[in-house]
Structures are given as structure tokens and as C-alpha cells.
Image (cartoon, grey):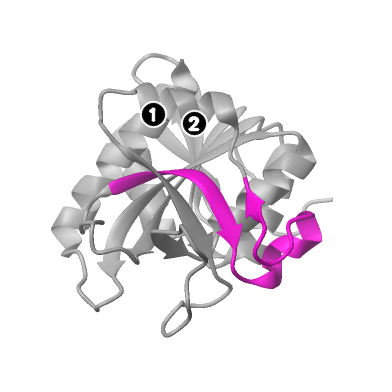
Amino acid sequence: MLSRLRPTASVAADAILVGDPGRALLLAQELLEQPKMSNHARGLWGYSGRTPAGRPLTIQSTGIGGPSAALVLGELAELGVRRAVRVGTCTGLDETIGLGEILIAEMAVAAGGSAAAHGVAVDEAAAPDPALTERLAAAPDGFRRATVASFDSRPEGQAAPPGAVAADMQTAPLLARGRVLGLEVAALLIVAEQAGGDHLEKDALELAEKRAGRAASAVLSA
């Protein structure tokens, strides 16, 4: 039974998931021909339409944090979504990770408890769908594969799990929920800030969002 989404247009089997509703609108305008708003309930803007290649695609915002993302993914599964790529932002924890870099989540360590409801305990890792991840890695964009950590709040002052080079608030719970639902889920994360406090400028962030969105759309169309 749907509690967050109230779709007013059909939802595609393939979806790009973003936290920010503004990013959903940006990617809908970038990736879809004549996009139609498929959800506006609870401020979770969603859009559906066809790519220039004619493939149906939904772009859906999930809100902030892992619990919200996992709930939205569950409702999208009820509506027929079978594959999804998260296009989100993260904080770089390693000095080798540059602002604006786009990372392919190879593993997502649960650094908070919100993934536990979906079978991934704190300090355990959730894995993305291998086929989608391999396609992202094989794309000509040159994105780096990386282990990320998902916290339940902003990770300021919190120690990152060993091996994690970036942190966010959604990827581990989202991947864990996707596995439970039998969905193919992968993630692309834009380094929008660094642990030292530097932030990506708005225009540069939008360019990175479009670049990651195009990569996700291409992989879902394959």
C-alpha cells in the first residue's frame, strides 16, 4: 500500500533516484523528452517520460536520509520499478578524492543503523547490483570505483570505516533495501564537499549532476 507516492502518470521499470527534488527536475529536463510529473506528494517530485532513444525512464526524488530512500524504493517497486541508479552527492574523506569527482559505489558500509531493518548491520557492507556496476565502470566516463560509508546524519567528526573514501546518508540502506526487494540497484556519487569544508560551486555541481545522470540513463538503456 502506497503511503508516500501518489503517482499521476505511469512509472517506468527503470529509474534514476535522487535525494533532492530540484535535482529530479534538473535531470528530467536534461534526460527526458516532454517529461511529465508523476509525483508531487510530500514534496517528493518525480518525473516520467522517454529518453531521446525512446526508452521509458522515471526520475524520482527520495528525500533526505536512508529511511526515506528505502521507503520510496519500496513503493517504486510496487509501481513496477525493477532497476534503479542512485545519483547523489557525498563528502570526500580521502585527500585523493577531488571535488566534482564522480564515484561508482563498489561497496557501501553501513555507518549508521538505518540499514539494519534491511539486513545490513552497522559496519557491514551492502553491495550494488554487479551487472549495473560493471556497466557503469565500463562506460567511457572514467568514473572511479570506491567504497563509501553511509551515516544516518552528517558525518562531521565521526570516524569513517576503514577503506571508505567518501560518505553519504543513503547508499547503504538503499542498496540493502534493493537486495531485499530483488531489484537491481547501483549508485553514482558526486563529491560535493570535502571533510575539510570545501564545497563544489553550484554551477559545477549542476554540470556533474547532468554528467552522472546521462551515465545512469545510458546504463539503464543498455
Residue drawn where x is 78% and y is 43% of the image = 180
Which residue position holds label 2?
133
Residue type at mark 1 is Ala
> Where does the magenta region start and end?
102-126
Label at residue 108: none
214 w.r.t. 95: above or below: above
Q: Nearer the viewer, residue 46 or 114?
A: 114
The location of residue 193, given as percent across then percent down, is: 27, 67
* Observer-nearest of 145 and 171: 145
Farthest-out residue, right: 1
Look at the numbered disc 1 and give the secondary structure of its residue: helix
Under circle 2, the secondary element is helix
Q: Name the residue beneath numbered marker 1.
A: 137
Task: Provide residue 113's location: percent of width, then percent of height.
Answer: 70, 71
Question: Label 2 amino acid?
Answer: Thr
Camera sees residue 117: yes
Please tell me whether residue 154 is drawn above or below residue 89 in the rendered image.
below
Distance between the Cα atoms at labels 1 and 2? 6 Å
Q: Return the x and y of residue 60 as percentages of the image width and height.
A: 52, 47
* Residue at the outermost bottom position: 157
Q: Is residue 108 left or right of residue 204?
A: right
Relative horizontal placement of residue 165, taking residue 204 as reference (left or right): right
The quarter of the picture where residue 218 lies is top left
Which residue is at a point 84% across and 50% down the rendered structure image? 1
Q: Are marks 1 and 2 in contact (CB under 8 Å)?
A: yes
Residue at figure coordinates x 69%, y 43% from the top left = 178
85 shown above or below 124: above
**Viewer-side residue, 48 vs 152:** 152
